[in-house]
Image (cartoon, grey):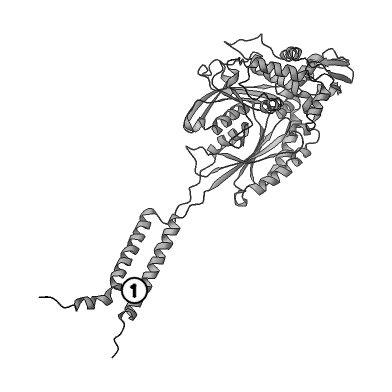
Amino acid sequence: MKEKNPWHTPVTIIITVIGVIAIVALVTVAVLQNRPLAQKYKYGIVLDAGSSHTALYIYEWPAEKDNNTGRVEQTHSCKVKGPGISSYASAPSRAGESLRDCMQEAKLRVPGKRHLETPLYLGATAGMRLLNIENSSASDVVFHAVEEALQKSPFSFQGARILSGQEEGAFGWVTVNYLDDRLKQGLETTGALDLGGASTQISFVSDNFDGSESPENAVAFRLYGNDYNLYTHSFLCYGKDQALRMVLAQQTQSGPGTILDPCFHPGYNETKNYSVLYDSPCVSDRKPQGAPATFTHLGKGNFSQCLDVVKSIFNFTYCRYSQCSFNGVFQPLLQGPFGAFSAYYFVMNFLNLTDTSIPLDTVRKKLTSYCSTPWDQIKQQHPDVKVKYLAEYCFSGTYILTLLTEGYNFTSESYPNIKFIKKIKGSDAGWTLGYMLNLTNMIPAEAPDSPPLPHAGYVSIVTVIAILLFVLFILSLRPLWPRCSKQPQII
């Protein structure tokens, strides 16, 4: 009679099936438990409503925060077509409509499941500050139109408001230092120099400033577990566009029909309207009586004379503090490196003067040469630049140099401490990232995704399956047991 194969018995088959199931279960548990966890991200949107234009920035950060401060990174920016919202005072509904295209981009960039929880903020700066001073009711109507448009978005709209100059300067300082990882690592901080169209800000930490001499210029921050006492001041009307108005107002006080402007290139010739020039709170009280409707603006292209005209809009004689910058404003001694951004960067980059290792005397010589270049030649060299902007670079470069050296007291020794910057690690330099970073302290952190099983449970299951497989392995050797027992013994 044929001997039955012990490997084909029902018990052996059952053991084999159980073993395969156990192995599959062990592999499945291990894969699920150790798979990479998807990172949760939060999003925030900030609209920077400046004097000359509006820009939208999208930020994201991991839902789990470091020391209660989210690690914020810029993922997208969108420049709104048209001028700043303050320019729509006579047609406020267009202020809201102008934001539509960028808001549509934001809807596509932020994951749909995050729309409802993504905060949306609009901060208006010096342009709206001036409009609010000039006509507060017009300012309110513009804001109402903007808010109405933003409330229709799928995001969590948190309101639109005018930032104070102090806030604008302080959040710009946060941005520069955050992007350089100086806050997280507790390193020496970098000062911030911001130049817009209607205002300019200077912010830095000084060992000689405790806020007692000028409390209105003191701001305290707590970020990444560290405390910072910051000096900051914003000069309204000293952005480059309003500064140009003040310089032109200085030259048209007598209401002439023609001015020969040393801050514009030789051969420059434009007819300009007196009412447009003086249509700003920065100069409106200086409009000459009995002036003609227009004046002819001619360029002379003389850097040294331009310096004198630019200096005339600063007051360096009055100071009731131990030390001042200009216009009687307290400023402690400059300390540490500085990052200069916004119009500082764009103007100096155009003039090829962003390298601050170039001595100040050489910078002055380069500006002297540039300003004296005939207007026709300048237009031929830069055919792609809008004529309005191109015409103003001589003035803007001279103004920046005067503001830094005469206004803020940078010297030949400290000027190299300035770094002109546009972006840092992919994020635009400006107040918006600092604003978003500060706001994340008020947004609750989410718990990170966790593995399906707690660690102890995972270890227990793996151990039980491993023991089961071992037992099954021993049982699977059962057909060999009788043979081993029947081996002849040697006596």
Going by the image, does 285 lie left or right of 105? right
Q: Is residue 119 above or below residue 2?
A: above
| Residue 57, image quadrant | top right
Going by the image, does 93 lie left or right of 457? right
Q: Depth check: 83 or 369 in front?
A: 369
Going by the image, does 328 lie left or right of 300? left
Q: Is residue 335 above or below residue 482?
A: above
Going by the image, does 77 lie left or right of 490? right
| Residue 190, image quadrant | top right
**Pointer 1 local density, CA inside 10 Å: few below 14, some 14–19, many at least 20:** some
Percent coordinates x, y for residue 175 in the rendering: 58, 32
| SS at mark 1 in the image | helix
Amino acid tagged 1 = Ile
Q: Residue at x 81, y 28 (%)?
A: 380
Percent coordinates x, y for residue 172 in the rendering: 60, 29
The furthest residue to the front: 490
Q: Depth check: 210 or 184 in front?
A: 184
Quadrant (top left/top right/bottom left/bottom right) for the N terminus? bottom left
Q: Depth check: 77 or 220 in front?
A: 77
| Residue 50, image quadrant | top right
Q: Is residue 465 above or below residue 94?
A: below
Mark 1 sits on what residue?
15
Quadrant (top left/top right/bottom left/bottom right) for the C terminus? bottom left
Q: Residue at x 51, y 31 (%)?
A: 183
Q: Residue at x 78, y 39 (%)?
A: 94
Could one spot residue 154 in this view of the protein?
Answer: no
Percent coordinates x, y for residue 235 in the rendering: 66, 21
